[in-house]
Image (spheres, helix red, strand yellow):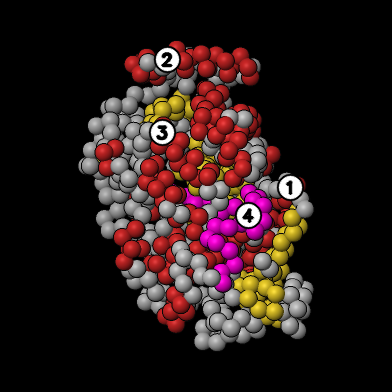
């Protein structure tokens, strides 16, 4: 989709996304229908890369600013995320949930495997699963973030790692041999050589396959005693194992520790890392343990207050099974032929890795294929969905790394059937290429707030500026947020030119219908087919412009030209 400078000027004429005009369909962030995870918009951010509210915590544990390009801590913290929550940034985008990277205490040292020094800014190299990493802030900061999000109807997802600890460094010793394996390195030839191995060299693999009882790692014992919490931690572990009857095997320690973040802070769900590198049954048990913790939290005063804002829905889990595609249906097939249905193993959703490739096709091919695939999955697993994305912190083949097509990206992500993941900076055209960076460091630059503030030019010159891109994303995001039919409804094309489709949703007493038209003329208004969705004489609204019109002859025409029409009834 090519959006010209004329279209940009038209969008700006409608008013900015952060200050809705008088004829807008609803205030930014308002919800017309009840929340469902099937239609969720998830905003994924690397906490260290998003916003720095407290420079005093930028370098904890002796960490230094001596990393390779894009491989050290940059100062983002939980307080920075909270500040943006309170400023309405996520509400204005129509975000339903914020996914933060693991906040647990990371290894203190660094690795140096040919790319220069790399610190654990990303959160996936744990040293102590029970403690907050001081670079990101304090326990109070996490409470503040979750409470602020809940007060605005936004959920918080925690990224959790069960597969591995952090690498071994001069400051970070290896865990005991009954806790982790340090070899062989995975060859990925079949399921065994994908799970019973280390993902990469020097990434100790937790013995999630073992049922043998293990003692606490000596380094944790010493650390907890120094911090004055050893007796409390041991008592809580004793209570957990006595209550559940689980063996004192490594995977159950980790389940208890991860569930503590839910019980203490009110975390609403997990994004589970490196899922296919761990035995499938681990995740079903984790879902059981975390769900129990979530129900306990709901009974607290904070939990009861939050339920008034976010709704009383079950604990949620989505999986990173690298290479899974919605086109493959409910099962993932390992090299070697083993098939696993992860929806049967605790997951409500699976990350869909095929959209960056599939998005190069036409709108109709993309939308109809995904809608049909989801219907087949849901026939076996009602309520299940996939989490779509176009770029992420790990995917070296993003759809549009240089942000040449930010409006097309918005259309193909935010209007895709299923759940969607906005990766921080998608909405501000943050370029995924950093001078001097190697590999995934290109994907992990700091959020481009300065470009947003100055409305810096984007892409090829016909896309306007960063603020214009964000305005466009926000309009689509708020429409999606308000209408479960967009992500959870059945899709059907209504017209080929201009490309027009409908989505219809009927579930649990909730009914929702929308019509969307794309690639509209940018110099004139034109009639749009809504036949079979809205009847003659009905008043409908375009959520993109805020304009209303009455259906006549199975069509509707709004008096203001716009590149898209997002049509629904108030």
Q: Residue at x 52, y 22 (%)?
A: 253
Mark 4 secondary-structure assignment: helix
Cα separation, mark 2 vs mark 1, equals 44 Å
Cα distance between the residues tagged 2 and 3: 21 Å
User: Which one is nearer the viewer's eye here, 426 or 541?
Assistant: 541
In-front residue for pair 113/105: 105
Reply above or below: 380 against 137: below
Residue range highlighted in magenta = 23-46
On the picture, is 484 further left or further right than 447?
right
Give how far across and how far down residue 135 sits, in percent. Answer: 33, 37
Dot 4 corresponds to which residue?
Answer: 39
Q: Which mark is residue 230?
A: 2
Distance in Å between CA atoms under marks 1 and 3: 38 Å
Give me the residue at 55% from left, 14% from top: 238
Q: Which residue is mark 1?
A: 382
* Residue labelled with disc 3: 140
Q: Quadrant of residue 485?
A: bottom right
Residue 420: horizontal and vertical position, in percent? Answer: 56, 55
Of tags 1 and 3, the one toward the viewer is 3
Q: Do the numbered discs 2 and 3 sit on residues whose CB atoms are within 8 Å?
A: no
- Report crowding for label 3: few under 14, some 14 to 19, many 20 or more residues within 10 A (C-alpha): few
Magenta stretch: includes residue 36: yes
Q: Residues within 10 Å of mark 1 (few under 14, many from 20)?
A: few
* Mark 2–mark 4 distance (CA, rounded to whole Å): 43 Å
First reached walking from the N terminus: tag 2 or tag 4 = 4
**Quarter in which the C terminus is drawn:** bottom right
Question: Which comes sooner in the sequence, label 3 or label 4?
Answer: 4
- Crowding around mark 4 (Cα neighbors within 10 Å: few <14, some 14 to 19, many 20+) is many
Marks 2 & 1, CB-CB < 8 Å contact: no
Asked if residue 186 shows in the view, the reply is no
């Amino acid at each position: 989709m090519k959006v010209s400078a004329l279209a940009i000027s038209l969008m700006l004429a409608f008013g900015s996304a952060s200050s809705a005009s008088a004829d807008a369909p609803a205030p930014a962030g308002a919800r017309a229908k009840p929340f469902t995870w099937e239609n969720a918009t998830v905003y994924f951010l690397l906490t260290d890369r998003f916003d720095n509210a407290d420079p005093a915590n930028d370098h904890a544990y002796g960490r230094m600013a001596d990393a390779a390009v894009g491989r050290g801590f940059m100062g983002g913290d939980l307080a920075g995320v909270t500040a943006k929550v309170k400023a309405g940034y996520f509400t204005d985008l129509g975000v339903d949930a914020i996914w933060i990277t693991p906040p647990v205490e990371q290894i203190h040292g660094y690795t140096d495997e040919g790319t220069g020094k790399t610190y654990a800014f990303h959160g996936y190299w744990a040293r102590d699963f029970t403690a907050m990493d001081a670079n990101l802030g304090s326990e109070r900061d996490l409470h503040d973030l979750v409470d602020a999000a809940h007060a605005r109807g936004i959920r918080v997802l925690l990224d959790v790692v069960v597969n591995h600890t952090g690498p071994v460094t001069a400051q970070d010793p290896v865990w005991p041999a009954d806790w982790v394996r340090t070899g062989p390195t995975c060859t990925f030839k079949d399921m065994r050589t994908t799970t019973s191995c280390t993902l990469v060299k020097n990434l100790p693999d937790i013995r999630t396959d073992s049922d043998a009882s293990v003692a606490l790692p000596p380094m944790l014992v010493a650390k907890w005693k120094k911090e004055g919490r050893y007796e409390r931690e041991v008592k809580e572990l004793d209570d957990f194992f006595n209550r559940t009857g689980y063996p004192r095997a490594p995977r159950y320690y980790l389940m208890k520790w991860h569930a503590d973040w839910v019980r203490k802070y009110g975390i609403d769900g997990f994004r589970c890392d490196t899922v296919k590198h761990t035995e499938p049954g681990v995740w079903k048990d984790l879902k059981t343990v975390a769900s129990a913790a979530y129900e306990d939290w709901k009974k607290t005063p904070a939990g009861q207050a939050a339920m008034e804002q976010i709704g009383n829905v079950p604990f949620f889990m989505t999986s990173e099974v690298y290479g899974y595609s919605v086109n493959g249906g409910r099962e993932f097939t390992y090299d070697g032929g083993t098939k696993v249905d992860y929806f049967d193993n605790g997951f409500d959703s699976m990350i869909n890795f095929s959209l960056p490739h599939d998005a190069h096709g036409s709108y109709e091919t993309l939308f109809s294929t995904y809608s049909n695939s989801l219907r087949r999955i849901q026939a076996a697993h009602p309520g299940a969905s996939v989490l779509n994305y176009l770029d992420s912190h790990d995917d070296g083949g993003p759809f549009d790394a240089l942000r040449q097509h930010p409006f097309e990206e918005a259309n193909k992500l935010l209007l895709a059937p299923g759940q969607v993941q906005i990766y921080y900076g998608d909405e501000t055209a943050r370029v995924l290429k950093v001078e001097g960076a190697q590999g995934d460091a290109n994907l992990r630059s700091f959020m481009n707030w300065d470009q947003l503030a100055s409305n810096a030019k984007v892409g090829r010159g016909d896309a306007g500026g960063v603020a214009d891109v964000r305005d466009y994303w926000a309009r689509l995001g708020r429409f999606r947020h308000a209408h479960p039919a967009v992500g959870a409804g059945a899709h059907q094309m209504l017209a080929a030119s201009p490309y027009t489709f409908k989505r219809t949703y009927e579930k649990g007493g909730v009914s929702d219908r929308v019509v969307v038209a794309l690639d509209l003329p940018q110099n004139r208004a034109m009639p749009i087919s809504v036949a079979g969705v809205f009847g003659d004489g009905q008043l409908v609204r375009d959520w993109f412009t805020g304009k209303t019109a009455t259906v006549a002859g199975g069509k509707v025409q709004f008096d203001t030209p716009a590149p898209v029409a997002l049509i629904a009834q108030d």
